[in-house]
Image (cartoon, helix red, strand yellow):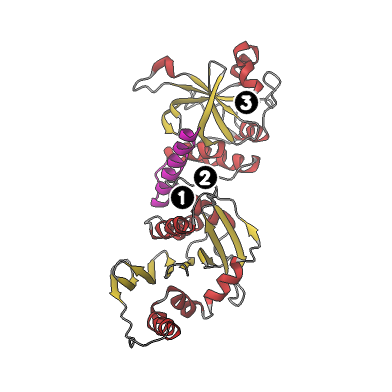
């Protein structure tokens, strides 16, 4: 069976799992990929390096479709290696160097990259429209040449394969990476592909109470607020539904009593189906849902109310009023209208909080990429339903 894969090669000391998770999520922000897979393995024979193998995880994708996706994704301006480097820098790991290889035996495709903050260098061989072609690319130049293989008419099939291999070997991405890393990278990558050590979840923002507390602290810093100011008593159940642990962490960390912003309104939001003005519910407002018989249907789905959504000041008005509720997993958000009709909001709870912090701050290029990915991913989820 022909081998095809796309792999990011990195030093774990420079690229933590969180950078892999966020970087791939940012790169995939505009792609309709529901269940991406990222498997990590140490590279045998290449000391100090590991590889992260990406696949779309789409069971319906044929081999050709999957390879096309890998090629397009890693050639994109915001490719996984670029986004992973940005995420590593955000996590306090600047100056990292990563390598990437998109490889296939099914059709000849051998595309190797070295990427760092200062730029990139790429060597590749592939099957073009006119035959075999090789290229070298940097931020400042791009050279592409056709590879001619001279063979006598009587050459046997084995002789032809050997001649082609000799002609393309100096141009292969895997040859370039072997020179860069001082080891036969292709064999190591194939070995790691079939012996992964762990899976890294591809997420824009991590789930769980600790992550939510960190996102609230980030939002408080951006808004020049104080962690936990005016925090009420732990939230009570609403119509028999206990608050998820992530919401309890939010309540403890959020600034509920900022004197500079007593209304505490987040205006002109547009992330997934959350459009308009948002205000996180106070204790009395949550108790209102406890008394509201219309909330019985939402409670039957184990939804917990956390925010109010109003229409945009640019239009929409009362007709757009709704409640944002948190699902029992403590991660998914739902928009509930009239206490009964519930639809996916798009972003997760953590993604909404990151979007809020990015929306009220001056953003770097990497943060622009991240907020764009947050909005695109949320939109895809809200449309999928």
Q: Is residue 351 above or below residue 111?
A: above
Q: Is residue 262 above or below residue 4?
A: above
Say if the magenta span includes residue 368. yes
Labelled disc at residue 129: none
Say if the magenta span includes residue 343. no
Q: CA distance from mark 1 to mark 3?
A: 29 Å
Nearer-the-camera pick, 205 or 178:
178
Q: Residue at x 46, y 67 (%)?
A: 106
Which tag is nearer the camera, tag 2 or tag 1? 2
Residue indicated by mark 2? 34
- SS at mark 2 in the image: loop
For the residues labelled 2 and 1, say whether their Cβ atoms are less than 8 Å apart: no
Residue indicated by mark 3? 303
- SS at mark 3 in the image: loop
Is residue 92 visible to the viewer in this orientation of the structure? no
User: Mark 1 vs mark 3: which is more N-terminal?
Assistant: 1
Which tag is nearer the camera, tag 3 or tag 2? 2
């Amino acid at each position: 069976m022909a081998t095809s894969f796309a792999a990011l090669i990195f030093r774990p000391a420079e690229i933590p799992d969180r950078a892999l998770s966020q970087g791939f999520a940012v790169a995939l922000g505009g792609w309709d990929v529901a269940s991406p897979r990222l498997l990590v393995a140490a590279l045998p024979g290449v000391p100090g390096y590991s590889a992260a193998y990406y696949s779309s995880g789409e069971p319906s994708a044929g081999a050709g479709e999957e390879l096309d996706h890998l090629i397009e994704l890693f050639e994109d301006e915001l490719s996984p290696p670029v986004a992973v480097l940005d995420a590593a820098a955000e996590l306090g790991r600047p100056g990292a160097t990563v390598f990437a290889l998109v490889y296939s035996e099914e059709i000849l495709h051998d595309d190797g990259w070295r990427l760092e903050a200062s730029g990139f260098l790429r060597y590749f061989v592939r099957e073009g429209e006119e035959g075999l072609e090789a290229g070298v690319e940097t931020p400042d130049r791009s050279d592409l040449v056709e590879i001619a293989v001279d063979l006598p008419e009587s050459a046997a099939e084995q002789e032809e394969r050997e001649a082609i291999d000799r002609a393309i070997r100096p141009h292969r991405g895997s040859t370039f990476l072997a020179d860069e890393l001082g080891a036969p990278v292709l064999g190591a990558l194939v070995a790691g592909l079939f012996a992964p050590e762990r899976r890294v979840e591809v997420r824009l923002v991590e789930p769980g109470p600790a992550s939510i507390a960190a996102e609230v602290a980030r939002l408080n810093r951006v808004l020049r607020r104080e962690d936990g100011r005016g925090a009420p008593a732990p939230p009570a159940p609403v119509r028999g539904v206990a608050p998820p642990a992530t919401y309890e962490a939010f309540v403890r960390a959020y600034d509920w009593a900022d004197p500079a912003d007593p209304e505490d309104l987040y205006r002109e939001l547009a992330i997934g189906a959350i459009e308009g003005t948002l205000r996180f519910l106070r204790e009395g407002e949550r108790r209102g849902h406890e008394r509201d018989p219309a909330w019985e249907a939402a409670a039957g789905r184990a939804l917990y109310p956390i925010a109010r959504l109003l229409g945009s000041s640019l239009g929409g008005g009362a007709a757009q009023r709704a409640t944002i509720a948190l699902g029992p997993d403590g991660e998914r958000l739902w928009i509930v209208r009239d206490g009964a009709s519930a639809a996916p909001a798009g972003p997760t709870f953590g993604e909404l909080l990151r979007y809020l912090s990015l929306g009220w701050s001056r953003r770097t290029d990497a943060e622009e990429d991240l907020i764009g990915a947050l909005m695109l991913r949320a939109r895809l989820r809200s449309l999928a339903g």
